[in-house]
Amino acid sequence: MMNNTNLESITEPLICWFQKNARVLPWRERPLPYYVWISEIMLQQTRVEAVKPYFNRFIQALPRVQDLAECPEDRLLKLWEGLGYYNRVRNMQKAARVLIEEYDGVLPADYEKLLKLPGIGRYTAGAVASIAYGIPVPAVDGNVLRVISRIIENDQDITKQSVKDEIEAMLLAVEPKECPGTFNQSLMELGAVVCLPNGAPLCDRCPVRELCQARIHEKLDVIPKKKEKQKRRIEEKTVLVIRDGFHTVIQKRPSTGLLAGLYELPNLAGHLSRKEVLQYLKEQNFLPVRIQPLKEARHIFSHVEWRMTGYMVLVEEMEQSESGMLVIEPERTEEEYPIPAAFSAYARYLQIKLGQEKYES
Ligand code: SF4
């Protein structure tokens, strides 16, 4: 059911509320199209607080579209390390190259043209167009879907494209011409800090509580409706922290599939015994002196969960291996080689901090 609440009535209270309550965020200080684009891609799936240091570091390292277009892949992935969804930053680079070729290195002030760029969908195109260029188009992400479906008491599954389309069309009809970016951000902000994604919404603080049909009809526990998430596939792994006193070993992941093209600590499928690990090390021509089990760890991706065990392996002096593994000083990995945060628990044994952890320290 879609309640016919007039969405036009929410624009003014939301804009007023946002103007008084908007969080100060680095990409809001100067909403250049390039900054809006980067921040919106980073914010998909990641908390605002976590994104701030990534954003600052990214625009410092790659201040212009041209710098992004020319950045070597390992450096680019290193800047993204810990944010996950690495194809997003690869697509950003592809888009940056198109921008250099076709638009003089500037994001076009045109919703349809933005949509044609690699990795830019309707939400990101809407955010860049409205926030950076003042074009009255909606930007509908999960936060906005939740807020609007509660306000209009929409009890349909918000993961369905048809429901998203309907909400987008409703918002397009009421986008205020003079400040669409502020209106869109007020909806996103309300969803992030008041109409919360997890836990009860803070309706007492909500500027549209008197208009919100789901609150009035006490349907907050059933709206928004989402279909049940598919169960994650469990994968067991044994991770090896191999050292010779000066060096450690990393390897490059395949160029397709999960975490494609990133680096990793050597690891094997399954939870292996000490004997099985020794056998593997011998096959790789390592000469182990000591082998010691490490704590279990796990990492959750959107569709897969890794359950890991590990071993610390002290070996005799290593030379570059012929099996494609890189023998390097651990500290070099912190600067040069992007390693996904899934390996954080074991990288710590090498005093390597990855992604988020590095910024927190
Ligand atoms: S009143 Fe409550 S449920 Fe409705 S939009 Fe506001 S915070 Fe969300």
Image (tube, rainbow, N blue to C red):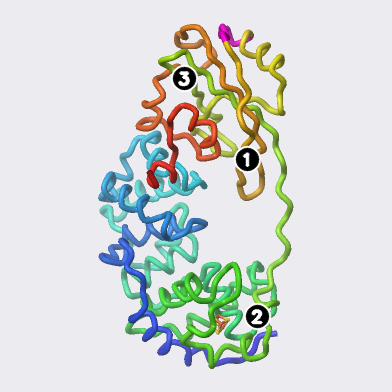
Q: Quadrant of the N terminus?
A: bottom right
Q: Does the residue at mark 2 contact the one at mark 1 (Cβ under 8 Å)?
A: no
Residue range highlighted in magenta: 283-289
Q: Does any atom of ligand 1 lie closer than 8 Å to the CB of label 2?
A: yes
Q: Position of residue 164 (x, y in %)?
A: 59, 72
Please tell me which residue lies in front, 190 or 292: 292
Residue at mark 1: 298
**Label annotation for residue 257:** none
Quarter holding residue 241: top right
Q: Is residue 286 magenta?
A: yes
Q: Is residue 240 magenta?
A: no
Q: CA distance from mark 2 to mark 1?
A: 33 Å
Horizontal placement of 101 versus 217: left or right?
A: left
Please tell me which residue lies in front, 36 or 220: 220
Residue at 57% of width from left, 73% of height from top? 145
Q: Position of residue 184 (x, y in %)?
A: 42, 75
Q: CA distance from mark 1 to mark 3?
A: 22 Å
Q: Amino acid at mark 1?
A: Arg
Q: Does any atom of ligand 1 lie closer than 8 Å to the CB of label 3?
A: no
**Label annotation for residue 220:** 2
| Circle 1 Cα neighbour tier, 10 Å, few/some/many (<14 / 14–19 / ≥20) | some
Q: Earlier in the sequence, mark 1 or mark 3?
A: 3
Q: Amino acid at mark 2?
A: Leu
Could you tell me which secondary element the residue under label 1 belongs to? strand
> In the figure, 61 relative to 9: above or below?
above
Q: Earlier in the sequence, mark 2 or mark 1?
A: 2
Residue at mark 3: 248
